[in-house]
Image: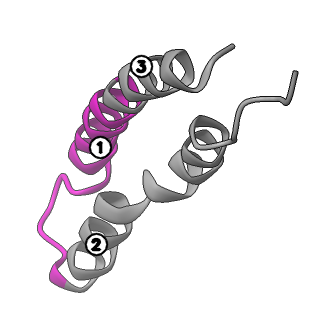
Amino acid sequence: MSLRMRKLTGAILLLLLVAVWSLAAMVVAQVIFTQPRPVLMWIYYPLAGLGWVLPAMPLVKWMLKPDAAR
């Protein structure tokens, strides 16, 4: 797969990852926080907000891999 095609595929997958991650984080928050718990909220929301970065890192690394020499 060419670099250009990997970037297009990766961009689409990243958008899908962020959309699914945010929806899942909202569902989990609704289940966990039926009653306000400020300390847990201060911990959960930053982790949930930045958590998508870890699964995105291998995808970005794959996207930027140089083309194989012919």
Q: Residue furthest front?
A: 70
Residue identified by numbered label 3 = 8
- Nearer the observer, 35 or 14: 14
Circle nearer the N terminus (3, 1): 3
Residue 52 place in picture, x, y as percent: 43, 51
Magenta stretch encompasses residue 62 = no
Specify whether 51 is left or right of 30: right
- Nearer the observer, 25 or 53: 53
What residue is rendered at 37% in x and 38% in y?
Answer: 21
Looking at the rendered structure, the secondary structure element under dot 1 is helix
What crowding class fits label 2: few (fewer than 14 Cα within 10 Å), some (14-19), or many (20 or more)? few
Q: Quadrant of the N terminus?
A: top right
- Nearer the observer, 4 or 25: 4
- Nearer the observer, 27 or 16: 16
From which residue to which does the magenta span run? 16-38
Q: Are marks 2 and 1 in contact (CB under 8 Å)?
A: no
| In the rendered image, the vertical position of residue 14 relative to residue 25, given as above or below | above
Specify whether 16 is left or right of 35: right
Looking at the rendered structure, the secondary structure element under dot 3 is helix
Looking at the rendered structure, the secondary structure element under dot 2 is helix
Magenta stretch encompasses residue 28 = yes
Q: Quadrant of the C terminus?
A: top right
* Residue type for callout 1: Val
Residue identified by numbered label 2 = 46
* Closer to viewer: mark 3 or mark 1: 3
Q: Are marks 3 and 1 in contact (CB under 8 Å)?
A: no
* Closer to viewer: mark 2 or mark 3: 3
* Residue type for callout 2: Pro
What residue is rendered at 31% in x and 28% in y?
Answer: 15
Residue identified by numbered label 1 = 31
* Residue type for callout 3: Leu
